[in-house]
Amino acid sequence: MSPTLLERITDSEDATTLLGSALGALCEPGDVIAIEGDLGAGKTRLVRGIAMGMGIRPGAVHSPTFVLANEYAPDDASRPTLIHIDAYRLDEGDTLDDLGWDLMRQAGAVIAIEWPERIAAALPSEALSVRLAIVSETSRSLRIAAAPRSSWAARLGRIPSQR
């Protein structure tokens, strides 16, 4: 069975943030979002949008390149925490364990991972896959894929079409 796909072109950073916000509004505890893209493709921008959709101040979101992971709590305590990981410098061994991967997964946080290909074997099969590609200086192509029969497969249909 093929994955459920959603493909969009955004024409500005704000449009990428808004698409991320639509994803964030649909996030549930325990979700993992694997975000791929070249440097400058808008991975952190998308995570800011996800945070916004989860009720977290988007301005608080910064790339965790040097700290590896940042944690953001929503204003509404009934919503899950967002953990933002930059896996560029990780491998599937001790570093991932040292980061507390198992505890993060058990805590029910939403986990957004930049450079997920570095830890592919550790990702759950139901992780949402997002691929950003640079189209032009301001435009980005986003290919969002949900595993068949995953809860994301049903939720993706609730993302509004482009305006």
Image (cartoon, helix red, strand yellow):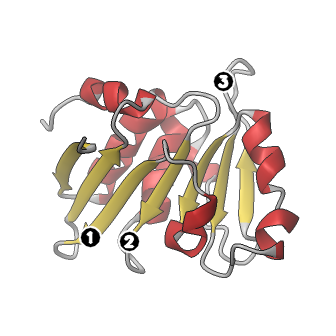
Q: Which mark is residue 51?
A: none
Query: Does dot 2 land on a helix, a strand or a loop?
Result: loop
Q: Circles 1 and 3: CB distance less than 8 Å?
A: no
Kind of residue at disc 3: Arg
Near mark 1 (Cα within 10 A), the count class, few <14, some 14-19 or many ≥20, is many
Question: Mark 1 highlights which residue?
Answer: 133
Q: Locate residue 72: give its quadrant.
A: top right
Question: Which residue occupies 27% across, 49% down?
Answer: 15
In this rendering, the answer to whether 75 lies above or below 143 is above
Residue 127: image location, x then y, percent = 49, 46
* Residue under numbered circle 2: 37
How far apart are the two marked residues, 1 and 3, measured between alpha carbons? 30 Å
Q: Residue at x 18, y 49 (%)?
A: 7
* Three-letter amino acid code of the residue under disc 2: Gly
State which tag comes first along the sequence, 2 or 1. 2
Identify the residue at image location x=67%, y=82%: 89
Q: Considering only vertical position in the picture, is 159 above or below 63?
A: above
Nearest to the observer: residue 13 or residue 43 = 43
Q: Give the class, few, some or many, for how many residues have Cα within 10 Å of label 2's Cα (few <14, many ≥20).
A: some
The image shows residue 79 at horizontal and vertical percentages of 66, 24
The C terminus: image quadrant: top left
Q: Answer yes or no: do the residues labelled 2 and 3 have beta carbons within 8 Å?
A: no
Circle 3 Cα neighbour tier, 10 Å, few/some/many (<14 / 14–19 / ≥20): some
User: In the rendered view, would you say 20 is above or below 41?
Assistant: above
Provide the residue designation for mark 3.
Answer: 79
Q: Are marks 2 and 1 in contact (CB under 8 Å)?
A: yes
Q: Amino acid at mark 1?
A: Ala
Task: Tell me where residue 37 appears, x and y as whole percent.
Answer: 38, 71
